Amino acid sequence: MSDMRLTSLKTKMKIILCTFLLCITAVSVFGQSVELNGIVGESIEFPTKVETSGSLIHSSVTIGLVQGGELISLTHPEFKGRVQWNKSTGLFSLSGLRLEDSGVYTVEKDDGQKSVSTFSLTAWSKYDCLCENIMLLIFLSGLLNRADVCLHM
């Protein structure tokens, strides 16, 4: 396999893997939680729009609060400075992801009609992504029955 084809295959595999890890299933059905995947150090958005009033909750603790269309500053030590609310999109986000941010989050919105969306966040380290990428490449090279595939990082 030529170096150019191998590089192209590796690039495609990286795109597929990262898309898989960052894929957000944006539909919550019958109260089931929506799975979110993020990478440590990066940001994740919770895909429930809060227009004027609502909150972001983690482990029964409110970590983000919107009232009257403004984000109210909360000082929970684990999330200080990392919770944002985008006024134009209405979405909460969590920046500077940490492995310990993995868990269940709830967005409660009260924009005239109350609704609750639950999200299960998994934060992955970049090392996990690299290992998954290598395993996927090895698997695919086996499918292609190619023994001459070299892993260049």
Image: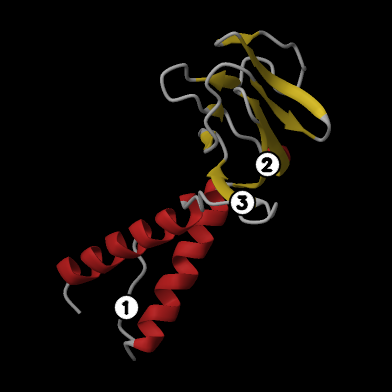
Under mark 1, the amino acid is: Val
Where disc 1 sits, the SS reads loop
Circle 2 packing at 10 Å, graded few (<14), some (14-19), many (20+), is some
Give left or right: position of 107 versus 50.
right
Image quadrant containing the C terminus: bottom left
Q: Is residue 64 left or right of residue 19?
A: right
- Residue at the spot of label 2: 99
Residue beneath the point at 54% across and 43% down: 39
Q: Which residue is mark 3?
A: 34
* First along the sequence among labels 2 and 3: 3
Q: Which residue type carries mark 3?
A: Val
Secondary structure of the residue carrying tag 2 is: helix
Tell which of 32 and 120 is nearer to you: 32
- Residue 149 — which label? 1
Label 1 or label 2, whichever comes before in sequence order: 2
Mark yes or no: residue 120 visible: yes
Which of the two residues, 58 or 27, is positioned nearer the viewer here?
27
**Residue 23: % across, % down:** 47, 52
Where residue 68 appears, as percent x and y from the top left, is 59, 8
Mark 1 or mark 3: name the one nearer the start of the chain. 3
Query: Which residue is found at the position 70% from the left and 38% from the top?
Result: 105
Location of the N terminus by quadrant is bottom left
Q: CA separation, marks 1 and 2?
A: 32 Å
Q: Secondary structure at mark 3?
A: strand
Outermost residue to the right? 60
